[in-house]
Amino acid sequence: MRRALPFAVVLLTAAVVATARGQPHARFLSGTIPGTLRYQVVLEGPGPGEISGVLGELTNLEVLAGPVLAQQVTWQGNQPIAVTALTWVMRARTLGPIAVGPTTVRLGDASAVTNPVRGTALAGGRTTGEATRPELRVELSTPRLLVGEPLVVRFFVESPGEVGAEGWEVQTSFPESWSERLPSDEVAAVGATPDGMARVALGGWLVIPVQAGRLKIPPARARAVAAPGERESAALPVRTVTSRTVEAEVRPLPPAPAPFFGAVGELAFSRRLLENEPRVGDLVTLEVEVEGVGNLPLLDPPPIRLPEGLRSFPAEETHQWQPSRRGLAGWRRWRIPVEALRPGRYELPEVRFCSFKPGASYTSHTLPALALVVGPASAVPPVAAPVAATPGARGTLPWPALLLVAFVLGVAATAAAITWRARRRGVPLPPATGADPAQELRRLQLAVEVWARSRFGATVAEGADRLTAAGCPQAEAAEATELVRTCERLRFAPSLTAPADALPNLRLRVARLVATTLQRADRLEQ
């Protein structure tokens, strides 16, 4: 195969004629790699059987790859119409006329002949025989910005022969920053340099720096992407270009006048309680939302303060945004589980903080106070009263605790049997019979709390030290505290861990804990 002409770009005048359905027609298309072209035969409504093609006589052309078969089915009313294309990759041997004679297309047992196609191969440089090398340029929206402000980075390829960006792909990185590619409509497609060279935009990125200093953008690499069929030929020239390193100066934000948690942009904040008339033990969701344009993915939840008697759990986050030149446009939402430890009226005090608006200054925000009224628990299982330690009771358990131990042991034995059987059969574990994971977690938590009250006259909520002081061994006190904490976390923040996956292990741990026979030490009477 002859050496490629690196300066050749094919300028075509294809003789494409519209034909009746079932009659194939041929045409020339631009090649993705410079110096190549594609010869394509298109047939609408192919017949049954295999489809193949035999090229006609070639004039001043050589085949590099193909044919590649592609087919697309569309509908006109309720009638399917199939469009089939056979594509060859070619290049001109010398400058001058090029042509492909009538090509024969076989469809099963039938065959058809295409029209001939002619064109002309012309030099692609400024002068005949001059090779041209494209250049990859980087453009920054600004050379200086503040931490958290948006920076738009765009890449262009400059070359006399470039006509579009569809034949290129760009690989780049932005260390010490958050980045996301911009939609194509946010980047100008085609332009020209002052000396008339084609300037084609290959893509743009929204970059948000996270720290002050010199923001260095390493060299990017652009590669000409082959079209289907061109990838399969090692004879095709491969073209890559690399940009230079560019830098931007990132300055720190000015001192904030009020509590600041990193919000930069044109943002609005709100919060609300989602549940009405909760009771002790119920989950209340405090929803905090930020909406607008800014550095949404870099924000922590806005600060909240809870009055005594309320406790919170890890927040569950959702978001929806789209990148733009001004930042990310959309919203981000946190749902924070909150539980009341006792009934009453609570007030979540107002919260004041600030955000930074690019090009302006800090903006103050105030989230108003929220009222929460919590009723008494609706249905709490009875808890056995503490049992005084007497010599006659040593080594025995009160009957409520014995019943509870028997129930938990039964559940644990059933879970262990199901686990063993599932592992032997290689099937996934079924969920607990008719039990909601949150309800079962609550039952396991109550089992530990009843065990602590009936055995030691103390509650798990008072902490491991209180249980130890009441006579509980240190290891059991730590295990009880950890079990209650784990159950609460799974109940109120299920997105952190799948509760169903953790239940078998928790059942066994609770059964092992409440089955212990140690009791608090007797105290000598004065």
Image (cartoon, rainbow, N blue to C red):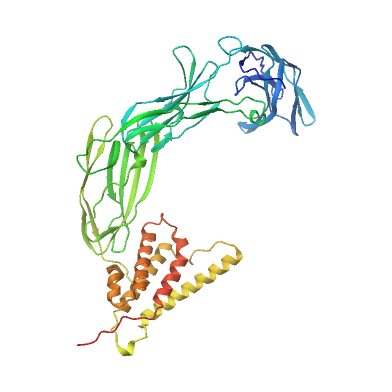
Q: Is residue 278 left or right of residue 440?
A: left
In which image quadrant can residue 291 be found?
top left
Q: Is residue 43 left or right of residue 488?
A: right
Q: Nearer the viewer, residue 526 or 69?
A: 526
Q: Nearer the viewer, residue 246 or 456?
A: 246
Q: Nearer the viewer, residue 424 or 298?
A: 298
Q: Residue at horizontal 30%, vertical 73%? A: 467
Residue positioned most to the top:
127
Residue 3, image x and y in percent? Answer: 68, 20
Residue 302, image x and y in percent? Answer: 28, 46
Q: Residue at horizontal 35%, vertical 40%? A: 296
Q: Is residue 338 above or below residue 72?
A: below
Residue positioned most to the bottom:
392
Q: Nearer the viewer, residue 333 or 132?
A: 132
In which image quadrant can residue 127 be found?
top right
Residue 74, image x and y in percent? Answer: 61, 31
Q: Residue at horizontal 53%, vertical 67%? A: 419
In which image quadrant can residue 247 be found?
top left
Q: Is residue 437 above or below residue 417?
A: above
Q: Quadrant of the N terminus?
A: top right
Residue 316, image x and y in percent? Answer: 37, 51
Q: Quadrant of the C terminus?
A: bottom left
Can residue 382 be seen at all in this image of the molecule? Answer: no
